[in-house]
Amino acid sequence: IAVGVVAALGISLWGGSAMAQGDSYTIKFGNVISAGDTQNQGYALFADLVKERSDGRIKVQVYPDSQLGGEREMIEATQFGDIEMTAPSVGVLANFDKSLEVFDFPFIFEDAETAYKVLDSELGDEMLAGLQNSGLIALGWGENGFRNLAMVKGTVKTPDEMKGIKLRTMQVPMHIAYWRSIGAAPTPMPFPEVFTSLQQGVVDGVENPYELLYSAKFTEPAHYLTETRHIYDPEVILISKDFFEGLSAEDQKIIQGAADEMVAKIRSLKATISDEIRAKIVAAGGTVTDLTDAERQQWIDSAIPFYKENASKVDTEKLKAILE
Ligand code: PAF
């Protein structure tokens, strides 16, 4: 990935810098994910590798659990150089670079392998490179995973049953449009507000990968889960463009190399975590329902009006390329 991104970026990689060769400094890496989750295990590996390969000169301080704010705030903080790194969901990032909206289409990826094929292709590299126009450099694709439903009052099996349901979504226009198109009442709100909203009945349910639903304790109030896998949600590992371009060639290489290993680690952890967490949810008294083939087909078909309405509003060529 790195080679492709670097080539597509066409920036002064390995070039001159504001930071002199051999300087010591700290990189602040903010994220909203719970401290023990697989992503933060990947970020911790990144911090260790960077420290080791720079002989302790470069320290990566990871701030999990929304300590530095929500995803939008941290993207802006990275753009302005208030923090150096963050790793938002591609959906939230699409508010900053519209071309990424193609990943917000439901049921676009059947499984993670298919998603990786696209993310690791020239198209994926091109999309990461496009972020430099927003003052950001993407070091690679991280992963939230496949999003599933978690409801407070009872299990939902078919899209028809979503009619009138208040579902917390991310602040992502395409997600909101899909849920609205099937008659639900999408309620966008930042992640840190969701637990209380579920408890107080402000929303009837939430959608996220199992690991994030569980570690954020959403599965306590919302313990009727359905494995809809409606959206595959990649995250993007971002570093401030001004900051990165100001580093020595040696340090850029250390950071990009460690990021490549972090991405590989996150993917390998994600391969098994959903099943592990699903078992924990059930052991804690939750209900997890699989869809029959016919029910899954109903969900896929439910997205057709959404595709018809929205395909022309995004980068249609990219959408077609992904679908192909
Ligand atoms: O639901 C969300 O807001 C996102 O999935 C999360 C947990 C912030 C990760 O990007």
Image (tube, rainbow, N blue to C red):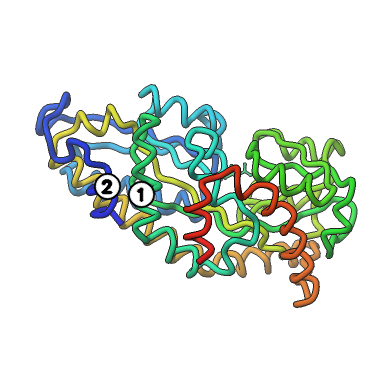
In which image quadrant can residue 282 be found?
bottom right
Quadrant position of the N terminus in the picture? bottom left
Q: Position of residue 164 (x, y in %)?
A: 89, 45
Q: Position of residue 254 (x, y in %)?
A: 20, 46
Q: Is residue 59 left or right of residue 142?
A: left
Q: Position of residue 196 (x, y in %)?
A: 77, 36
> Would you name the residue on which mark 2 appears?
8
Q: Can residue 90 be seen in the rendering of this structure? A: no
Q: Is residue 161 left or right of residue 97?
A: right
In the image, 249 versus 158, the foreground residue is 158
Residues at discs 1 and 2 in contact (Cβ within 8 Å): yes
Q: Is residue 16 left or right of residue 245?
A: left
**Which structural element holds mark 2?**
helix
Number of numbered labels in the structure image: 2
Above or below for 220 versus 186: below
Which quadrant of the picture is home to ligand 1?
Answer: top right
The residue at 12%/35% (across/down) is 15
> Would you name the residue on which mark 1 appears?
126
In the image, 151 versus 59, the foreground residue is 151
**Which structural element holds mark 1?**
helix
The residue at 74%/40% (across/down) is 195
The residue at 79%/62% (across/down) is 286
Query: Which amino acid lies under the numbered mark 1 shown in the image of this protein?
Result: Glu
